[in-house]
Image (tube, rainbow, N blue to C red):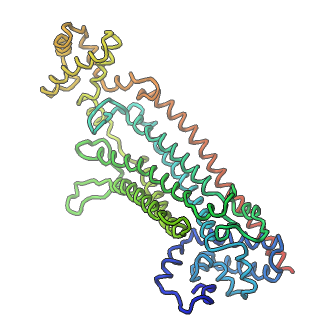
Amino acid sequence: MSFFWAGRFSEKPSDILKHYYADEMRLPHFMEALHWWDKAQIVVLAEQKLAPDDAIRNLVKALDAMEQEGVVKAREGQWNVIHGGEEYMRKHCDEGNAGWLHLGRSSPSLRVVASRIAFRNFLVQIMANVNDLRDALMNLAEQHLETVMPGYSYLQHIKPTTLGFYLMSWIEPLERDYRRFESCYRNTNISSVGTAEAFGIEFPIDLERLDELLGFDAAPWNARDSIRNYDYMIETYMALALMHNSIGRIAMDFLVWHTVEFGFIQAPDRLSITSSTSPQMHIPYVLEFVHGTSGLTAGRLMEALAITKTASDQLEMSTLLNTEFVKCAEESRYAIAAMCDLLSGMKVFKERMAQVANDYSSQVGAFIEYAIREKRMAYRTAHQVLAKLMQRVAATHTRPADIPVEWVEQAAIEYTGVGIGITQATLTEIFDAMHSVRQRKYRGGTAPERVVEHIAHARARLAEDRVSLVKLSDGVVKAENKLTGAFADLKKRVLAA
């Protein structure tokens, strides 16, 4: 039983209560965050002389014993996770000493401070993973600037493109994801120390010093908002769900391309399985997992939103949202690692991509561009001439490379009454898929030079984001080093006394 419940209740808590109140929070990252605050609390109590010297000495000895034992191991053995530090210290010193640890704190503020610390640590890792995926996509795109393939709409060929252009189409979404995670970090890394039960504290504790030692960047104006609103958690869930929506769509595209019917790519053996009955199968198993993770993440976002549909003073969100997010973050890490590994090792069948791009009419729209630019034909007129031509092409199953120039002239005469005057050599050129790719050389286009420019810009932006991420993580590391140094000085001083 929680030691401070004994004076209120006559029964020991059931295992059911233990499950919901304690075990849900019995997670290493959460216990380490609680320990960080306990350590900072002792330092500030000593610096301000808010607790008696004997109490400080005993708290220091107890916390040092916990660190010698191992923080997670020591806290796992306590019934009460939230107050595990105080519970542990009660076994090393009496209540008159251990009880000072709780000055200016409460169960809700302990939960939220630890949750904010844990969430920000996860966010740093997630942002690093996003940057790894951006890098992996660009590395592969650079290798396939001229790997021509069909572009799709409704899974139908629409225009020729390149694999490099396709891969780069996911870079800006991931850049936006990174910005969203930066926003999540800013909104997460707001201090909740000194908020107590949501109404502030009655003691002149140096909250700014606590913020400094815990690595918080900002302070709240309203204690109730600080520990009763969990939008920073929901924002993080949303950002993760958005990112994995994109990653899941890439995985689905790759799953389609991996089929025998498409034959565009093949996953490396290390990421694949085969069938127990049909050994000819080469199953890109990780892609199924990556795609499935997007659904799980979206589902957990819905869970999170549902959990927060409560009266505004209820606190289960601070337990359940934190616990579920650990699973989200872990699944995200594996999914991105799998996608990066796939991108670095998958086979790309360039000849097959080029064959499909050229043989199934994705490039015939280049006729419209030619007719407008060279023959000054109105867009819609050129479109309708091409439509006439395509009726015949479809009926005869003719490859674009085999379309005789006479068919084009006949289509033009049928629709406009006059021929267009195009040679077979010109028709062969404009019906080459790569020619069509190169023609789209303006902003946002498929032309290789545009993709090269995009990669250069994206790499510069990635470099900037990596620097900014180092600054975020360095801020936390500096705070931890300050706390480690302050506690070491305190320990040396009190033990020498």
Q: Residue at x 26, y 15 (%)?
A: 381
Q: Quadrant of residue 409?
A: top left
Observer-nearest of 334 and 177: 177
Q: Quadrant of residue 407?
A: top left
Q: Quadrant of residue 303?
A: bottom left
Left or right, 322 with reference to 372: right
* Quadrant location, the C terminus: bottom right
Residue 363: x, y in percent?
29, 26
Residue 421: x, y in percent?
24, 8
Q: Residue at x 83, y 74 (%)?
A: 49
Asked if residue 21 can be seen in this view, the reply is yes
Asked if residue 270 can be seen in this view, the reply is no
Q: Is residue 77 above or below residue 467?
A: below
Residue 339: x, y in percent?
42, 51
* Quadrant location, the N terminus: bottom right
Left or right, 318 with reference to 45: left
